[in-house]
Amino acid sequence: QQPVQSPQAVILREGEDAVINCSSSKALYSVHWYRQKHGEAPVFLMILLKGGEQKGHDKISASFNEKKQQSSLYLTASQLSYSGTYFCGTERNSGGSNYKLTFGKGTLLTVNP
Amino acid sequence: GAVVSQHPSWVICKSGTSVKIECRSLDFQATTMFWYRQFPKQSLMLMATSNEGSKATYEQGVEKDKFLINHASLTLSTLTVTSAHPEDSSFYICSASYQETQYFGPGTRLLVL
């Protein structure tokens, strides 16, 4: 079952913040965030495994809510390099799936000077 | 670490011919690799899960006789598109499981004339 991402697209000026949401109708085991630039492969950003977990590096962070059905990706003080399509990939079952993920439709983030 | 390569990056072929795409994990061993297909501005659609030494598991609606997958070693999986037709034109991306997530190759653009 495909997770739902919102918004579908967002346009920012350099330095502004953005939040991208990823939700599921079922409880999730983990959420994985990727960024894909045009014509390139997705690049792994981070994984969240535990309900209530928050992670981050540089100015990109994410949370995974207690009920483990929603994750949010936070981009603060956006840079031009943040532009791209952000995908969340969800894993419903722990162990044995070898990290098989179902991806949302993506959120296109454009950062302008 | 966790580098995945794909070859070729671009391929143009005539309708009816077969095309082989290679996916290699360069600095780690991958017992599981995944093959995706992505149309422009769309999400990553999982085609099949490739397990080393065993048959691939195909997603519903994916023709296993048309998309042949071989995972002969812990660092190499191949996808062969047999008797390719123009509707098979797409961006094919592989990924490999490593440390609780997937790492993606750079993708292969296939154009069938």
Image: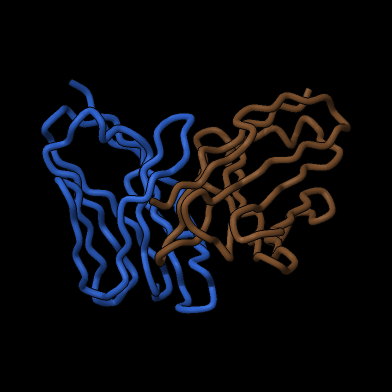
The residue depicted at 71 percent of the width and 47 percent of the height is B79
Percent coordinates x, y for residue B95 in the rendering? 53, 52
Direction from residue B80 to residue B17 in the image, left or right:
right
Q: State the image quarter where residue A36 is shown.
A: top left
> For this rendering, which residue is in front, B96 or B46?
B96
Please identify the quarter of the rendering in which residue A96 is found: bottom right
User: Residue drawn at (45%, 47%), measured in percent from left and top?
Assistant: B3
Please tell me which residue is depicted at 62% across the width and 36% down the height of the picture. B7
Instruction: Say if A13 sits above or below B38 in the image.
Output: above
The quadrant of the rendering that contains the C terminus of chain B is: top right
Residue at point 70%, 49% (across, down): B78
Q: Position of residue A62 (x, y in %)?
A: 23, 57
Q: Residue furthest front?
A: B27
Q: Is residue B107 left or right of residue B62?
A: left
* Nearer to us in this view, A21 or B109: B109
A76 relative to B63, above or below? above
Coordinates of residue B11 in the picture (x, y in percent)? 69, 27
Chain whose colour in the figure is brown: B
In the image, which lettered chain appears blue?
A
B3 with respect to B50 (left or right): left
A23 displayed left or right of A58: right
Is B67 placed above or below A79 here?
below
Q: Position of residue B5 (x, y in %)?
A: 54, 42
Rendered view: B12 above or below A23 = above
